[in-house]
Amino acid sequence: MLLIYLTSVVVFLLILLVLAQAACVKYYLINLRKSQATSNADDFHPHVTVVLCLRGCDPALDVCLESLLSQDYENYRVVCVLDSEQDPAYSRVKTRSENPRLEIQIAPPDNFNRSLKCNSLVHAFGSIEDPVVVLVDADATVDNQWLAELIAPLKSPHVVASSANRWFLPDARERGSCIRHFWNLAAAPQMFTYQVTWGGSLALKTDFIRESGLLKAWSKALFEDASVRHFAKQAGKQVVMLPALLIPNNESITVAGATRWIERQLLDTKLYHSCFPWVVIHAFSVLITLCSALAVLPALVLGGLYSWVIALGIALGLFFGFYLWAWQQLESQARAALRKRGCRIEGSPPRGITALSAIAATQVIYTLAVVRVLFKKSVIWRGINYRIKRPYDIEMVGYRPMAIKNTKANESI
């Protein structure tokens, strides 16, 4: 009977999805606990250049600068790169120009075939001689051991890059912030498993950047981070992910802003990482399987096939039970890691109906974002429109310095 056959396939797919996702989450949690227990700065202390590319005043910019300039590490400098002195962030950085560790560079775009961030990186590397470079974002507030722990894996001659990840701490009353949080929560195990590096906390060996062709790739790229694994693999080198070195972020964002943010993360992966087909397969597998389950369930009830109704109900229970378990485990373990690092955590995670509605909204927005990214030919990023022909064929349209935006005090740019 066709209905029984379809039901058996749906039950099988639900169980398969649970097992595959549970394995990924468990692998991540084991490594999070392991790296949390063994986290140390070792005795590796090379000279380091920390590069902070700025465009606009991120809500945490002042705190970020203060934390970067207060690292418990001797041999480092911080280079802030902006595309214009008219940028509102310039005056904020300028107030700290007397700090001997801080250097400010202005990098107006001299090439419209790359993003402003990649343009700033290419400009900065014209004066970098230190053996290690660390990329960081302005929404990162780091503890004073962050730099030492981030670069520690680079002591190995086989390792050319190490990366941490962010963890959002949303106000439970803000739907957009909750959606971004739950998407990131689900993405973290995948990023760890696939080694998708994040440019907001990324350490790299300078020789690798220049010799592998990565710097040349940045000279015509939109994003800088997801491509690192590809170039490391080509060079026969390793990338190390540091799941316990989480960077807290409590910025707020609207639903529309969260949607655009999710699309940019997926676009980065689509253009520069080999795991994107698996991301697409996973998104559509979940969507098709759940829709199929909801479609066959009424037919089973009307047909009196109650044993199959029970079987499908158990499979759906396992599926949603897994999501509940994964959400609770990931949230509690991440917050434990942040507390161990001395990070201040305000408020509690979303709970109850608020959490369930945000998770449901996240799944819908995520699936729609995957579809949109499959056909996306342009993106607006920090006020600039970029046309995308191919991963390394980008056109910046209509450059202008960053304007002052009247947003909420804690709202993401």
Image: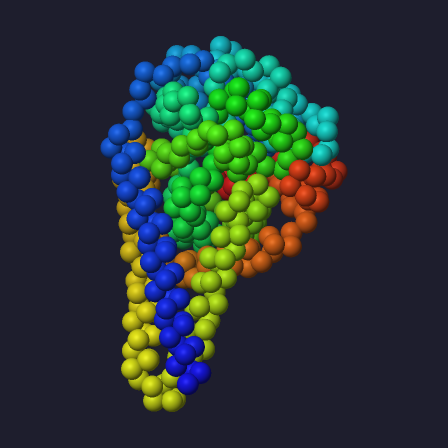
Q: Is residue 94 visible?
A: no
Q: Relative to 287, is 258 above or below?
A: above
Query: Residue 316, how many percent across, how many down?
Result: 34, 69
Residue shown at 29%/28% (left/top)?
A: 39
Q: Is residue 214 visible?
A: yes
Residue shown at 73%/33% (left/top)?
A: 112
Task: From the viewer's side, name the closer residue of 298 and 311.
Answer: 311
In the rendered image, which quarter is residue 19 located in? bottom left
Image side of residue 389 versus residue 159, left or right = right
Task: From the viewer's side, name the closer residue of 254 and 37.
Answer: 37
Q: How was this image coloured? A: rainbow
Residue shown at 52%/55% (left/top)?
A: 280
Image side of residue 219 versus residue 355, left or right = right
Image side of residue 338 versus residue 130, left or right = left
Query: Residue 100, how many percent across, how many down?
Result: 49, 10
Quarter of the image with the N terminus in it:
bottom left
In the rendered image, which quarter is residue 272 located in? top right
Residue sitting farthest toward the left: 37
Quarter of the image with the C terminus in it:
top right
Residue shown at 52%/29% (left/top)?
A: 235
Residue sitting farthest toward the right: 398
* Tally of numbered tags: 0
Residue sitting farthest toward the bottom: 303
Query: Residue 247, how many percent across, how many down?
Result: 40, 35
Query: Residue 221, how many percent across, how many down?
Result: 64, 35
Task: From the viewer's side, name the closer residue of 184 and 382.
Answer: 184
